[in-house]
Image (tube, coloured by chain):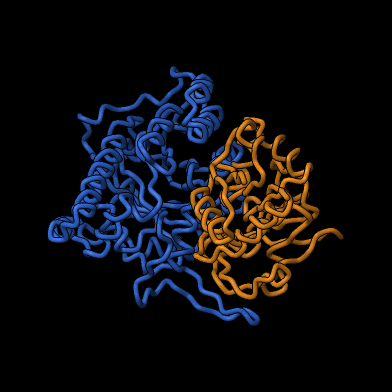
Chain colours: A blue, B orange
Amino acid sequence: MIPLSGDITGAKGIMRQKIGSFSISRGTTTLKRGFAHMLKNGVVMDVTTVEQAQIAEDAGAVSVMVLDKLPSDVRKAGGVARTASIRVIEEIMDAVTIPVMAKCRIGHVYEARVLEEANVDMIDESEVLTPADETHHIWKWDFTTPFVNGARSLAEALRRIEEGAAMIRTKGEPGTGNVAEAVTHIKKVNDELRTINSIYESGDHQDLVKMAREFKVSYDLVEQTAKMGRLPVVNFAAGGIATPADAAYLMSLGCDGVFVGSGIFKAEDAKERARAVVLATTFWEEPDKVKEAQKMIDERQSMLGLDVKNLELRMQERGSTA
Amino acid sequence: MNIGVLGLQGDVAENINASRQAMAKLGIKGTVKQVKTPEELASLDGLIIPGGESTMIGQMSLVNGAIKTIKEKIQAGMPVFGICAGLILLSKNVRDKTVGKTNQPLLDLLDVRVERNSFGRQKDSFETEVSAEPLGIQRMRGVFIRSPSIEDLGKNVKVVSKFNEKVVAVQQGNILATSFHPELTNDVSLHRYFISMVATRKK
């Protein structure tokens, strides 16, 4: 069981209020992590327009992520990538019933504030956009809106959780249509989880303290994670997923769900593909159903994809040392 | 006793855990497992439809035919507990607070109209103390995440809980439904009530 409690004392994002005779709290860890729990086994799709958001909802997406450009276009365009237009985000929020997320730059506290005021359901502090602070991520406990962060190692994931992230996703290599990096990242996180879990089981507290120093996070968080043998928040796959089989493969590696960025709307068969990726994610344990989903798409219409070895820009490295 | 949690999407594990705890507290022997297919659904004594995205769960249960089996089983008297998305799926009518009428698959059994996202978006999600006095529960933690509320109750629908004049839990015979998430708290009293409903029917 993933724990749902764990507020730090004095978290500014927690709001208390009286409504009638009821005392209510907003922005608690239970509400933030609980929101992520409702997305489990689902697909979150990157969209840039209302039409794409509606296609995503009709296909069975559990949420949409609004961007100004899809990650592969961000890569092509170069320059500085920033948060999406608020007007587009609002149009999409008015058009679909599923939750709407949006990305802000790493460390850009005020892009995040603007997104919170715009009332998005979750904020992705994302390496797809150009980082605004090389040394600090956002202190997410200051927000009532929950955050998701990318990570490619256990240390990175735990640092983000310590900063208040309510959900983690792999970084992968966004906008490449190449699933290899996401696979590497989830395997690495799983491997490190097994390691600290076995240290915990052995009762060697000194070694756990050593891990906490190495990870640069508090001992308590390392101990809690080591005891469970999994991340204390929901963990999704992201970065380079382009086909139903990609999604099913990542689910089989223990991911709680998937984000699909350029993979759907950079393909020429977006509508069928959106549906097919949802089917493969839902029924990943049944290979015959994944085959049926894969049959719905045409490989000749997949996005071209990039070899991750020759990239000029490796988005996954952004913010990973902080 | 055979309890299933519809496992297409959403917080399935939390409901399995809460049901197991509730069974242990009542001293009832049985199994609780995740179910997806019509075959898995066929052998159940009780079903929980968990929180998640109702549009997605509805569509996927249509794809593999689960929706038909679920409907037949509930009509034949199997107790069902719908939470948030589950409440939406069970109901006869649904509208969204912002978008208005939605075109989504429904089980069309619970005689109410559900307003989706009734309390606002995620930032407005909240937790508070609620009661379910008709079920003998004086106080419990209510976790409301982008929650719906319940309107236009049919004459066979009993109010179980209210939050500030909005109905947030109801019962209609073998159907129990809440707009909040008891599975996200340590208090299993509602799951316990549901397990007793299943036990009573099995007798």
Image position of B141 (left or right of B152): left
Q: Position of residue A118 (x, y in %)?
A: 50, 62
Q: Quadrant of the C terminus of chain A?
A: bottom left
Q: Is residue B125 above or below residue B13?
A: below
Seen at 45% across and 68% down, the residue is A28
Regarding residue A91, the answer to whether it shows in the image is no
Q: Position of residue A74 (x, y in %)?
A: 35, 40
Q: Is residue A279 above or below residue A43?
A: above
Seen at 68% across and 71% down, the residue is B136
Q: Which residue, as the protein is rendered here, is positioned at the far right?
A: B155
Residue closer to the observer: A100 or B119: B119
Regarding residue B79, the answer to whether it shows in the image is yes
Q: How many numbered marks, from 0 up?
A: 0
Seen at 41% across and 42% down, the residue is A69
Residue closer to the observer: B65 or A130: B65
Q: Position of residue A7 (x, y in %)?
A: 38, 70
Q: Is residue A207 above or below residue B45?
A: below
Q: Quadrant of residue A56?
A: top right
